[in-house]
Amino acid sequence: MLKVAVIGTGAICSAHIQGYLTFPDKCQIVALCDIYPEKAERINEEFSLQAAVYNDAKTLLEKEDVNLISVCTPPYTHAGLAIDCLDAGKHVLVEKPMASSLEECDAMNEAQQRNNKILSVVAQNRFTTPMMKVKQILEQDMIGTVLHTQVDSFWWRGHSYYDLWWRGTWEKEGGGCTLNHAVHHIDIFQWMQGMPDEITAVTSNTAHDNAEVEDISIAIGRYPNGSLAQITSSVVHHGEEQQLVFQGEKARISVPWKIKASLSQENGFPEANQSLEDQLMEAYNTQPSLTYEGHTGQIQDVIESIQQNKQVLVDGIQGRQTLELITAIYESANYQRTVKLPLTKESPFYTRKGILKNAKHFYEKGKSIENFKNNQITT
Ligand SMILES: NC(=O)c1ccc[n+]([C@@H]2O[C@H](COP(=O)([O-])OP(=O)(O)OC[C@H]3O[C@@H](n4cnc5c(N)ncnc54)[C@H](O)[C@@H]3O)[C@@H](O)[C@H]2O)c1
């Protein structure tokens, strides 16, 4: 039986707690920690956990003999907390984004190596049936070389969203919608398509004059074979119509699932390739569905990886790659130039200090509130 602790008992912690509670024969939540311990007490009561409550992680690590810790705190705390947990010999599941700089990601991965414990970065959208099916189909090479990828990470957040004390600043949130919202789609994009070798991007803040960070970015990635990807990250899109579209030589597939396949007529104009469309549909429909999706699916993966000593699906290397793409978007937009990947330690955005010094501040953060009355979120 794995003993579990959760650090940070705000909005997202319920998804972790529900995940752990789905596997009562495999794990038990024994400790909660928040700098506002009354929030941890409320969670204890809400889920009838009878967990010990702490107001700082160091004391929790000294007093509790836990195996696995979920880090559900704001981004600027992820690296410090995850490293302390790993150095205390615990496995760690850290919320997205992995950290607020590549330097911090590297330090986390070193701590993972040094302690030989699991470090998994939350990317719960991978753990959905449609994503897994599309990944499989791409791996079977049914659509030919991918020529264009479209990533629409469209979200909508009102002005007051950035009033929460840690949001809307480069120091504490670490970035805007590219880092904190599109991270989900950028993770899936690099998992399915691999890393492009250059990025050209533009960022803007169009509707949130209470935030230092961007509320929209548009980036273009280029692969060595000339194939292009366009990644739009936004919190100004009503309806949040998110999609990942892969345009292959032979067919187009996407999440949400939709297919089209064309053949060329004699004059180059398209006609439907019904046979390939049928094969793609068959490949999609015959794959099994996941038993557990979202955070619960990822928690299942982490628990099984600990118990069976196997590799987690989303490790610190994957988390770092996603952050590298995001960092390249920021660097490119900031200096209005194309950025080559991989980024090196010489990148002005490699360290947190560099980001704070160099990143464009769109506005000053306005109001700062400790907590919203309504803690319900959608993910
Ligand atoms: N995976 C997802 O879909 C998803 C959705 C929302 C948020 N998140 C991520 O989860 C993290 C937390 O976001 P949230 O929306 O739950 O924020 P939140 O502010 O609601 O909760 C964070 C909690 O951490 C506590 N905290 C801050 N510093 C701490 C520290 N040093 N030690 C202990 N507790 C500390 C705060 O008091 C707060 O209760 C962020 O990294 C965010 O990007 C992920």
Image (cartoon, rainbow, N blue to C red):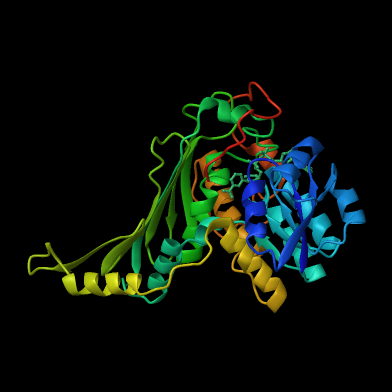
Q: Residue furthest top?
A: 367
Relative vertical location of residue 55 with respect to residue 256 in this rendering, above or below: above
Q: Residue at x 67, y 59 (%)?
A: 20
Q: Is residue 140 left or right of residue 165?
A: left
Q: Residue furthest left?
A: 266
Quadrant hosting residue 307: bottom right
Residue 276, position as x, y percentages in the image:
23, 73
Quadrant hosting residue 67: bottom right
Report if residue 41 is visible in the image: yes
Residue 213, position as x, y percentages in the image:
58, 34
Residue 251, position as x, y percentages in the image:
27, 66
Q: Residue at x 35, y 66 (%)?
A: 146
Report if residue 362 is visible in the image: no
**Residue 250 versus residue 12: which sits nearer the camera?**
12
Relative vertical location of residue 310 with respect to residue 9 in this rendering, above or below: below
Quarter of the image where ligand 1 sits: top right
Relative vertical location of residue 17 with respect to residue 249 in this rendering, above or below: above
Residue 47, position as x, y percentages in the image:
69, 48
Quadrant hosting residue 139: bottom left
* Rendered-image quadrant of the N terminus: bottom right
Relative vertical location of residue 377 with respect to residue 144 in this rendering, above or below: above
Q: Residue at x 59, y 30 (%)?
A: 162
Q: Is residue 152 left or right of residue 101?
A: left
**Residue 209 versus residue 103: which sits nearer the camera?**
209
Count every numbered label the image shows and give the total.
0
